């Protein structure tokens, strides 16, 4: 029995989600764009329309160049490693090895913790001399490494924390996808004489492509969105070596209280993310095999 | 029906008049405060605010712990911008110019007009009052003030063959003694460093200010429009920090403020440079003999003052103003200042607090508490200008670039100075 679609009801029911979307996504974005054309109000004078002057300051900002380089390196570092780690963990957990329940729990535990708690745990791990990693390194006779206080290493330390936190979440997605791979495909491959490595690379991984696209988009969003660990552990330092774009926006807007420049940076970030999302969906979507 | 309506209207009007009449003297105070050191600060503040609330039953006060100094400032400013400022808050003394520029505070000297109020304002140490004044008015009142001091492990000194009664007074002595105090294990890795000076973030900039003062210069002045980064004193201070690491007296790279006391207590360093506000924490947790002294200085003793003051916000009612002033006077009375100082180690900012019997017996039992007070004449205000957060970041970047990276000190300071001048020239 076909029910006729009641257009009036649909429209009314969709107005509520649409208004949320406009209120919390489109309106702030447009407002940020408008704010970026004005300068800051202060107690001595109201804010003035200054056109593109904020964008000129943006182009001349060398701290921004450092921040963008950091963000790029951070994204390139965390996304592939987190994905590969998630696939490996999912394959492990889905196998017939003993204690898979314990493995599942321990791989997923970091994801359940709030990022601020994770950051504090890793602050203890990283503390030079008294932290856990220093103690482990000293057992092997290796000199302690200053993870958070060295301009060359601080960004990598932040990347490790991020990968540790999010790989568990991606593992869950891959686990679900693995369990929906039809058994008859694997059996057919075994009959043809394929070893398990061959099965993984030629059958399972291609079928995981849709999940990989989803996970990659999520990882990209997280690479830009998760900055709690930077706020807690290094505050972008030393000397801006671990500052990411969203952390820079936070620091400029709420630390320096430079709301106009913060709006300008926000517009930049929205543009960057929009371009990347378009590229990801267009490029990866063409190669996916959906069942 | 109309009679009913008239009666209801009359009773409603009557009730609201009565409510207004009883609340004309009552005020609800919101009090934001930060915690910047390892100390039972929250419990002590609550004890003090409850004591005031008991003496003033017509008012209510809600003490709200708002995180560290930067977070508390952020919360207070955000609330003020939203039109609901806290009536009173403890914020960094150096936030003065930011708060004035955002026009959210009122000078306490404008509210405190009676002769007893004026006497109260003049009873504080001048060393802590210099950074409360701007354009002839007093904007804030000292509450949790400190200078950093040099804590050292007496047993470590004896092990290294050094006399615990003569801690280092100059930078050269610090380097020499630091090298002797450093202990390595059989693999050649250091298990205990000679000293530990936090160099990262705002805390690193604070201690750096003390180094500059000990070389005879300052980082900023009372105008709020001058930043002095590219000076010989600052250059020498950066070189001293590098020298400590290069000669093996201090761990290389950036050093965090937060776990410095813990590193001292765990024997990972033989001495630390940190706030006197950590005194109570170290006293109750050290399982070795320890002592304190002035910070080793370049050309003589020097230190920065730091810590938080009471501010009263604008946009609050008359009753709230009066209640807030009364609250601040209570919290900074000699007895309250003594309780606060004993619980934390912060320097009581007024002379009569040190004369109370509690403080006298406390300082007899723990003479280390007097060192920060004795250092006060050699201390100068912490770095503060308009757009403080932005301008301090230039200094922080320069220090971090040199200590945690391989930036050239002279270039880093010059770069910071140029950027600071760009920002501050607008205000001159």
Image (cartoon, rainbow, N blue to C red):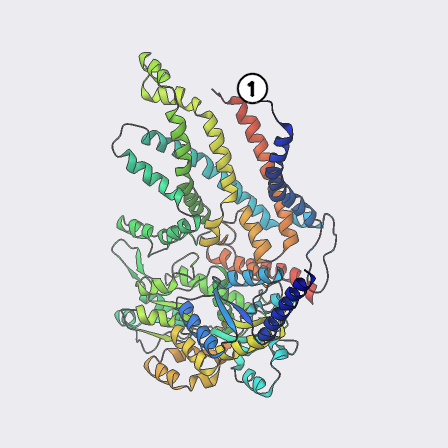
Looking at the picture, how far across and down is residue A82, in whole percent? 42, 36
**Residue A19 locus on image (x, y percent):** 63, 40
Q: Is residue B230 left or right of residue A200?
A: right
Quarter of the C terminus of chain B within the rendering? bottom right
Tell me the element at label 1.
Answer: loop
Q: Quadrant of residue A173?
A: top left
For residue A169, which quarter of the picture? top left
Q: Residue at x 53, y 72 (%)?
A: B309
Residue on which the image places disc 1: A2
Q: Is residue A31 left or right of residue A199?
A: right
Instruction: Indicate the position of residue A11 as horizontal and vertical percent values.
Output: 64, 32
Number of other residues with Cα within 10 Å of mark 1, as a class: few under 14, some 14 to 19, many 20 or more: few
Q: Quadrant of the N terminus of chain B?
A: bottom right
What is the total number of numbered labels drawn onto the structure image?
A: 1
- Vertical arrangement, residue A52 with respect to residue B37, above or below: above
Decide if residue A95 is on the left or right side of residue B121: left
User: Could you say where residue B265 lies in the image, as x and y percent from the top left?
Assistant: 32, 65
Residue B199 vertical placement versus B187 (above, below): below
Nearest to the observer: residue A276 or residue B260: A276
Residue B173 visible = no
**Which of B66/B55 is in front?**
B55
Query: Looking at this view, is B162 or B425 the one in front?
Result: B425
Residue B286 seen in render: yes
Name the chain letter of the residue that bears numbered label 1: A
Taking the spot 64% from the left edge, 49% from the top edge, the residue there is A263
């Amino acid at each position: 029995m076909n029910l006729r679609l009641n257009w009036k009801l649909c429209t009314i029911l969709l107005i509520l989600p649409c208004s949320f979307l406009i209120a919390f996504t489109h309106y702030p974005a447009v407002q940020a764009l408008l704010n970026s054309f004005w300068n800051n109000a202060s107690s001595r004078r109201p804010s003035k329309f200054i056109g593109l002057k904020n964008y000129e300051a943006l182009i001349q900002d060398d701290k921004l160049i450092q921040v963008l380089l950091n963000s790029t390196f951070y994204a390139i570092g965390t996304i592939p490693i987190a994905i590969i780690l998630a696939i490996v963990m999912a394959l492990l957990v889905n196998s017939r090895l003993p204690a898979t329940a314990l493995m599942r729990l321990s791989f997923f535990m970091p994801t359940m913790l709030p990022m601020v708690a994770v950051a504090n745990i890793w602050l203890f791990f990283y503390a030079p001399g008294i932290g856990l990693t220093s103690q482990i390194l000293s057992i092997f006779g290796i000199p302690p490494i200053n993870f958070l206080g060295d301009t060359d290493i601080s960004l990598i330390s932040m990347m490790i924390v991020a990968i540790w936190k999010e790989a568990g979440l991606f593992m869950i997605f891959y686990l679900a996808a693995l369990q929906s791979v039809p058994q008859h495909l694997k059996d057919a491959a075994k009959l043809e004489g394929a070893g398990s490595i061959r099965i993984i690379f030629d059958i399972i991984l291609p079928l995981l492509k849709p999940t990989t696209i989803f996970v990659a988009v999520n990882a990209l969003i997280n690479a830009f969105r998760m900055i709690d660990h930077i706020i807690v552990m290094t505050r972008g330092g030393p000397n801006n070596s671990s500052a990411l774009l969203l952390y820079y926006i936070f620091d400029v807007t709420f630390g320096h209280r430079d709301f106009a420049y913060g709006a300008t940076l926000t517009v930049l970030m929205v543009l960057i993310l929009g371009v990347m999302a378009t590229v990801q969906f267009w490029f990866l979507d063409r190669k996916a095999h959906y069942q | 029906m109309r009679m009913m309506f008239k009666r209801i209207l009359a009773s409603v009007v009557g009730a609201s008049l009565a409510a207004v009449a009883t609340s004309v003297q009552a005020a609800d105070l919101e009090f934001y405060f930060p915690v910047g050191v390892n100390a039972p600060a929250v419990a002590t503040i609550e004890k003090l605010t409850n004591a005031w609330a008991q003496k003033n039953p017509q008012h209510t006060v809600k003490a709200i712990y708002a995180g560290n100094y930067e977070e508390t400032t952020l919360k207070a400013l955000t609330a003020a911008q939203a039109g609901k400022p806290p009536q009173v808050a403890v914020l960094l003394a150096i936030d003065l110019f930011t708060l004035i520029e955002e026009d959210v505070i009122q000078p306490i000297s404008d509210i405190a007009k009676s002769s007893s109020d004026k006497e109260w304002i003049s009873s504080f140490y001048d060393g802590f009052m210099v950074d409360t004044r701007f354009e002839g008015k007093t904007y804030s009142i000292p509450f949790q003030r400190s200078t950093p001091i040099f804590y050292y492990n007496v047993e470590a000194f004896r092990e290294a063959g050094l006399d615990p009664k003569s801690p280092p007074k100059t930078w050269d002595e610090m380097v020499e003694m630091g090298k002797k105090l450093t202990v390595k294990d059989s693999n050649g890795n250091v298990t205990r460093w000679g000293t530990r000076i936090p160099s990262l973030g705002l805390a690193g900039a604070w201690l750096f200010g003390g180094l500059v003062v000990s070389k005879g210069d300052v980082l900023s002045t009372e105008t709020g429009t001058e930043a002095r980064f590219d000076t010989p004193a600052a250059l020498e201070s950066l070189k001293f920090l590098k020298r400590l690491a290069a000669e093996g007296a201090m761990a290389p790279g950036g050093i965090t403020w937060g776990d410095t006391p813990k590193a001292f207590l765990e024997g990972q360093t033989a001495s630390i440079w940190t706030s006197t506000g950590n005194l109570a924490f170290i006293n109750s947790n050290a399982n070795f003999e320890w002592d304190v002294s002035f910070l080793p200085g370049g050309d003589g003793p020097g230190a920065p003052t730091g810590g938080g003051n009471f501010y009263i916000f604008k946009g609050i009612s008359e009753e709230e103003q009066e209640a807030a002033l009364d609250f601040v006077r209570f919290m900074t009375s000699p007895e309250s200042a003594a309780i606060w100082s004993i619980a934390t180690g912060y320097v009581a900012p007024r002379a009569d607090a040190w004369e109370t019997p509690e403080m006298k017996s406390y300082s007899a039992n723990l003479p280390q508490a007097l060192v920060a007070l004795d250092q006060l004449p050699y201390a100068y205000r912490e770095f503060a200008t308009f757009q403080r957060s932005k301008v301090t970041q230039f200094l922080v970047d320069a220090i971090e670039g040199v200590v945690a990276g391989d930036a050239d000190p002279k270039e880093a300071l010059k770069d910071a100075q140029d950027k600071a001048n760009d920002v501050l020239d607008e205000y001159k």
